[in-house]
Amino acid sequence: MGKPKTIVEKIWEKHIVHEEEGKPDLLYIDLHLVHEVTSPQAFEGLRINNRTVRRPDRTFATMDHNVPTIHRNVIKDEVSKTQMDTLKQNCTEFNIPLADINHPDQGIVHVIGPELGLTQPGKTIVCGDSHTSTHGAFGALAFGIGTSEVEHVLATQSIWQAKPKTLNVKVNGKLGTGVTAKDLILAIIGKFGVRFGTGYVLEYTGEAIRNLPMEGRMTICNMSIEAGARAGLISPDDTTVEFLRGKRHVPQGDAFDEAAKEWKSLATDEGAIYDEMVEINADEIEPQVTWGTNPGMCIPVSANVPVPESAKTDNEIEEIERALEYMGLEGGEPISSVKIEHVFIGSCTNSRLADLKKASSIIKGQKVHPNVTAIVVPGSHSVKKAAEAEGIDIIFKEAGFEWREAGCSMCLAMNDDVVPEGERCASTSNRNFEGRQGAGARTHLVSPEMAAAAAIEGHFVDVRHMKVPTA
Amino acid sequence: MEPIRKHEGIVYPLNRANVDTDQIIPKQFLKRISRKGFGQFLFYNWRYDSKGELREDFSLNKEKYQHASILVAGENFGCGSSREHAPWALQDYGFRVIIAPSYADIFYNNCTKNGIVPVQLSPSEVQQLIDNAEASDYKLTLDLESKAIYDNQGFHADFELDGYKREMLLNGWDDISVTLTHDDKIKQFEQQRELS
Ligand code: SF4
């Protein structure tokens, strides 16, 4: 037996193309996902330099960031349309498979990768998008890259990377009823801050992580970037294998069992050494709500919004003051007293079938509060179809939610789905930055269940105290 | 990209932590399909009010910073989205050097691919530079070869930058041409893969 290794070390070693003292390693990339916003300049670069796409068969493109979610083919914004048309032309020219706006596989890039089985344990996966960390839920080494790197990967199927340090995020105990993966990751970022992961790959371990289904694991890994980490992952186990069985792009039959054996062997060895470790207890975590303008500014739903005087340094006091002002909050009020005008259930964090099901279970037979506009945007066309097959769309529609087509939508409001200035949104997405959901819009990040509950009540409530209707 | 070896410039202090890429360049400007012309949208929601008029209370709009080319900011600069539009906007606006106590990883990388030198100094050094630049017209010089930042009043700080990134910046090289010199290795790797 050799020295025990982490999953990151194992994947890394299998992908080194070239190494040299004092330089980053040249790492081979197994899967390159592409979307319309961060790719046009990369393709342009290829053309200018007379280069081509090395492995179109390891590249997969979709349109998600600025697709309309009401009428599929009514794209009011000319510039958005140009961006989508450009992706289509680029994919045709370079022979890259594309799930375009009318394709049955279309969806948010981080939802469709796993859904199609393109995402697999042990793969190196990149995309010009910081939430590429989502794919780490499968035990893949997946990280976001900039457009210059997109061009580099298109041309060479490889990337220069310094070997990352690893950080073990150990989650002990069990999550309580009504407490979700979203609450867990928000609590982790709230506790350790928005930069604790910078420079590291996070590996989430411990009982609470093992107990999560793949959807919850994706929610966790998705928000690694909000902790500063480019990548976050979870060692593959039976849950991973069962999720992937039968997916379109994974091996089938006996070959699948072979692959599964190999995948499981990638799990971090007993006794492997991480560069850092943090620990948190799942039992203590309550449903979370963010009150400020970064994801670390979050509190349990039973708590009060902080006051600036609670901070230690001048800079922190200023930060809290600025956030309170932007968010239109006083400081000191119970977060549950804060009224909302919008609810957005969607995004690559929380738009999978399991998320929609759980949210729908809260609202069944109830009505959206008259002051609230609520929308559900499924993560992919397949999620939408599957939900409709189970009648979940009906539950939402009867409660007064709008049921939309798949895309990023109000997560970043690049299409027409925008929160108006000064209005407040309970959102299942991952970023509550200033202006993220529209100029002057105020975002509160929550789980799908908490968003659904807020839609009904018109303000934040502890979902654990909601009367869940009996079917 | 344009090589950078030595650079002297006016310092613009942005005394905020966690400046995210949504602030550096808001998403409504991400729809262009070329790399050029993003400078006019830099910090758009801070520089302009909802009617599109310059906000006088935002420091970058002040006369004394009009030709600034060195940006000094707080912790975790460039966090959030991977959009390379952020360094494109900074560069197009005229910034060649950024100084902060820490950076988001992707942003840091993106800078070095676009001829911007991301300098990491200690929080107290950064605070000192911010104070200097807020108090008076203040210039700094970057010497990338010796990895140092200094002024003419006795401030001098060394910084770290990985040798590879430094070489690329100094020469203005593009990664792809370097990588393609290893093409045989990539081929070999792919062949071995297919066999196993
Ligand atoms: S859903 Fe939001 S965070 Fe996810 S890829 Fe789309 S824009 Fe980015």
Image: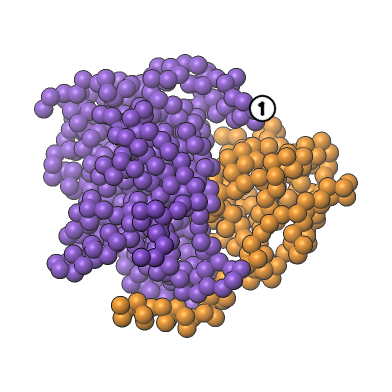
Chain colours: A purple, B orange
What kind of element bears circle 1?
helix
Q: Residues within 10 Å of mark 1 (few under 14, many from 20)?
A: few
Amino acid, disc 1: Asp
Tell me, yes or no, if residue B194 can be seen here: yes
Residue shown at 24%/66% (left/top)? A259
Residue A425: image quadrant is top left
Residue shown at 27%/23% (left/top)? A464
Please indicate whether residue A326 sits to the left or right of residue A268 in the image. Answer: right
Residue shown at 27%/48% (left/top)? A214
Please indicate whether residue A376 sits to the left or right of residue A424 in the image. Answer: left
Q: In terms of depth relative to the viewer, which is nearer, A182 or A5?
A: A5
Residue A225 spot, x, y in % from top left: 46, 47
Outermost residue to the front? A1
Residue A380 spot, x, y in % from top left: 27, 50
Residue A215 spot, x, y in % from top left: 28, 45
Residue A469: image quadrant is top left
Residue shown at 66%/59% (left/top)? B161
Residue A87 spot, x, y in % from top left: 40, 63
Q: In terms of depth relative to the viewer, which is nearer, A127 or A78?
A: A127
Please indicate whether residue A20 sits to the left or right of residue B132 in the image. Answer: left
Question: Label 1 lies in what chain?
Answer: A
* A454, above or below B72, in the image: above
* A241, above or below B73, in the image: below
Q: Which residue is mark 1?
A: A314
